[in-house]
Amino acid sequence: MSTVAVTDATFDAEVKNSDIPVVVDFWAEWCGPCKQIGPALEELANEYAGKVKIAKVDVDSNPNSAAAMGVRGIPALFIFKDGQVVSNRAGAAPKAALQNWIDSSI
């Protein structure tokens, strides 16, 4: 399973109403650090398939979701569990750090 592209229209269904934890990556095409963590998130999406969903929200195309979450800088990562934010972090990080963060949050 690869990452899931989420829009303002699908945010509630894909993220808040998910039956498994969801990592949401708020990103943009022009963002260098966002591009740095992209491959790691794809790998983690495959490794966590069926256990954790990795969702990506393009803030340029979907500003409402980012605004609702109070995103001021990207990449901004949030973990949702049972429809609630249980953890968040900002900025790029190596795959191992992202994996540790996910494991400690779910």
Image (tube, grey):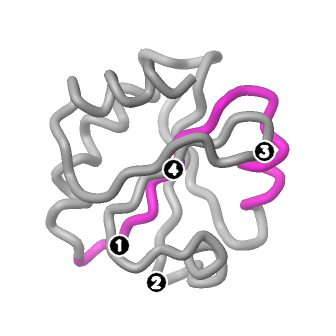
Residue name at image x 77 percent, y 70 percent: 9
Q: Secondary structure at mark 2?
A: loop
Range of residues picked out in magenta: 11-30
Q: Which residue is mark 3?
A: 83
**Disc 3 and disc 4 in contact, CB within 8 angstroms:** no
Residue 32 percent across, percent down from the top left: 15, 67
Amino acid type indicated by mark 1: Ala
Residue 35 lies left or right of residue 54; in this view the side is left
| Dot 2 or dot 4, earlier in sequence | 2
Q: Which residue is mark 2?
A: 60
Spatial CA span between label 1 and label 3: 24 Å
Task: Name above or below for residue 86 compared with residue 9.
Answer: above
Residue 39 lies left or right of residue 63; in this view the side is left
Q: Which residue is mark 1?
A: 28
Spatial CA span between label 4 and label 1: 16 Å
| Dot 1 or dot 3, earlier in sequence | 1
In this view, the mark in front (2 or 4):
4
Task: Tell me if mark 3 has few (under 14), some (14-19) or many (20+) residues whose alpha carbon lies within 10 angstroms of its own.
Answer: some
